[in-house]
Image (spheres, rainbow, N blue to C red):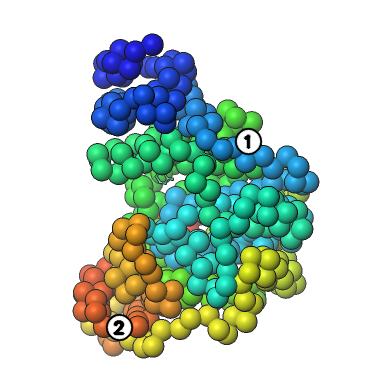
């Protein structure tokens, strides 16, 4: 087989065989195919698309390009989750304790945040002492004993994705639904869970903003999962506004604790409980959605989910003295300049404003300040008065304060009329 012939085929919009895809992925990882040739493949694929068969073959080959986690010696139904990323999205920290309390096993590798989106690991790292870098055997032992663990992705997992993503990032080829599918699903397959729920975000803060395209991504990922024998569902959920009110790491952990205490913002509770319910349905623990949703709420109300969260924190070296979570030195309110209704959010810009305050990173090597971020107490359609706070900025220095305030003023749009339609929080469930 010859890489130039393979590239010519893809350039001419012909579908590649599974063998040709395997040749390309293996060659990319062992270095026998040059980065510029891999890039040519990615660009041709971005332009012409990939068939379902090509996408499945690419996903499988990428998944097997490195270490595969074997969870078969952990008893029970192993459950994983992926979110395509958002602002204020902290649902994993709520739903994994819920499903662990329900008797399922939550085994998850998570990532750090980048750009406007937050990462679960950064949120957990704001808990003093919490460690995410557990060895796989320790991770599995913790899942066996406590029912849940969240750790960082190991270096050996899916090297093909690390290489492809780095090339896509600098060649304008990230926004391809089949390539995103292969990237996400290869990592999920390598994790070896039995059940997977994908939270596919749509709206102004999402990776894919368009409703139809995010539906296509959800459908493709579920199809690939099913093609590999995994039980999977995708939920299409709104990122037209931040989820909950807190954006920023320790602030988000506090909001998670509020929910686990039976309180917290309604939208966050709804999405977290709905994902937990979908996991229970796929695992065969409950037979219908309403029953599963009510069970998730009941587990929280009983305190069992909070107990699971605390067990996970303690097992991973963290402190459950949550009063000692880092807090910012100053809280600055940003007030409405006029009365009206909240008509729209530029949610990505809200994430960027939080990043400017220190809650996120512009590039992978940046450090973050866990205490900083935003509380956004208003929601789409709310009536606000002039001078009413639209956001509270939690800061430890004033370096980027002016820019963050300017960004937030533009991102939270106040209009005179009641907004006609707000995006549904849960648009659809694909399974
Ligand atoms: N997240 C991933 O893991 N991969 C992509 O390609 C896009 C988002």
Circle 2/circle 1 CB separation < 8 Å: no
Asked if residue 371 is positioned above or below residue 351 in the image, the reply reads below
Identify the secondary structure beneath mark 1.
Answer: loop
Q: In which quarter of the image is residue 306?
A: bottom right
Asked if residue 267 is positioned above or below residue 66 in the image, the reply reads below
- Figure quarter occupied by ligand 1: top left
Q: Name the residue under label 2.
A: 397
Q: How crowded is mark 1: few (under 14 residues within 10 Å), some or many (20 or more)?
A: some
Query: Looking at this rendering, what residue extends furthest in the front direction?
Result: 31
Residue 230 is tagged as: 1
Identify the secondary structure beneath mark 2.
Answer: loop
Q: Where is residue 160 in the image (x, y as percent from the top left)?
A: 43, 35
Please tell me which residue is depicted at 36% across the width and 41% down the height of the picture.
165
Please tell me which residue is depicted at 53% across the width and 67% down the height of the picture.
124
Q: Where is residue 278 in the image (x, y as percent from the top left)?
A: 63, 50
Q: Is mark 2 within 8 Å of ligand 1?
A: no
Looking at the image, residue 331 sits to the left or right of residue 308; the answer is left
Of residues 12 and 4, the one drawn nearer to the viewer in this rendering? 4
Q: Position of residue 153 (x, y in %)?
A: 52, 50
Q: Position of residue 274 (x, y in %)?
A: 60, 56
Please tell me which residue is depicted at 26% across the width and 19% down the height of the picture.
11
In this rendering, does residue 276 appear at all? Answer: no
Looking at the image, residue 115 sits to the left or right of residue 66; the answer is left
Which image quarter holds the C terminus?
top right
The tally of labels here is 2
């Amino acid at each position: 087989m010859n890489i130039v012939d393979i590239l010519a085929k893809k350039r001419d919009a012909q579908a590649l065989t599974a063998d040709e895809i395997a040749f390309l992925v293996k060659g990319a990882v062992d270095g026998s195919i040059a980065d510029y040739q891999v890039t040519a493949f990615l660009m041709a694929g971005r332009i012409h698309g990939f068939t379902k068969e090509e996408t499945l073959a690419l996903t499988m080959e990428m998944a097997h390009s490195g270490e595969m986690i074997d969870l078969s010696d952990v008893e029970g139904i192993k459950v994983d989750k992926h979110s395509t990323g958002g602002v204020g999205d902290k649902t994993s920290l709520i739903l994994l304790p819920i499903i662990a309390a329900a008797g399922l096993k939550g085994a998850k590798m998570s990532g750090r945040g980048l750009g406007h989106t937050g990462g679960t690991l950064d949120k957990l790292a704001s808990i003093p002492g919490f460690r995410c870098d557990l060895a796989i055997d320790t991770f599995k032992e913790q899942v066996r004993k406590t029912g849940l663990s969240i750790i960082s992705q190991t270096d050996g997992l899916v090297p093909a994705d690390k290489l492809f993503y780095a090339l896509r990032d600098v060649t304008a080829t990230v926004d391809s639904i089949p390539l995103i599918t292969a990237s996400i699903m290869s990592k999920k397959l390598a994790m070896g869970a039995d059940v997977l729920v994908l939270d596919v975000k749509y709206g102004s803060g999402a990776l894919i903003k368009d409703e139809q395209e995010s539906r296509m991504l959800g459908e493709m990922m579920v199809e690939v999962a099913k093609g590999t024998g995994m039980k999977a569902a995708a939920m299409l959920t709104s990122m037209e506004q931040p989820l909950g009110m807190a954006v920023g790491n320790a602030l988000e952990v506090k909001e998670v604790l509020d929910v686990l205490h039976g309180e917290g913002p309604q939208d966050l509770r709804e999405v977290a409980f709905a994902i937990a319910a979908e996991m229970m349905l796929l695992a065969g623990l409950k037979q219908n959605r309403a029953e599963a949703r009510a069970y998730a709420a009941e587990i929280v109300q009983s305190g069992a989910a909070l107990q699971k969260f605390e067990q996970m924190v303690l097992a991973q070296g963290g402190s459950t003295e949550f009063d000692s979570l880092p807090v910012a030195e100053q809280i600055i309110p940003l007030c409405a300049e006029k009365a009206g209704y909240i008509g729209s959010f530029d949610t990505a810009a809200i994430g960027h404003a939080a990043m400017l305050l220190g809650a996120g990173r512009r590039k992978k090597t940046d450090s973050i300040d866990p205490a900083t971020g935003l509380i956004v107490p208003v929601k789409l359609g709310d009536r606000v008065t002039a001078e009413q706070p639209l956001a509270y900025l939690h800061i430890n220095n004033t370096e980027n304060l002016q820019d963050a305030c300017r960004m937030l003023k533009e991102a939270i749009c106040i209009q005179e009329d009641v907004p006609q339609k707000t995006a549904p929080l849960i648009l659809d469930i694909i399974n």
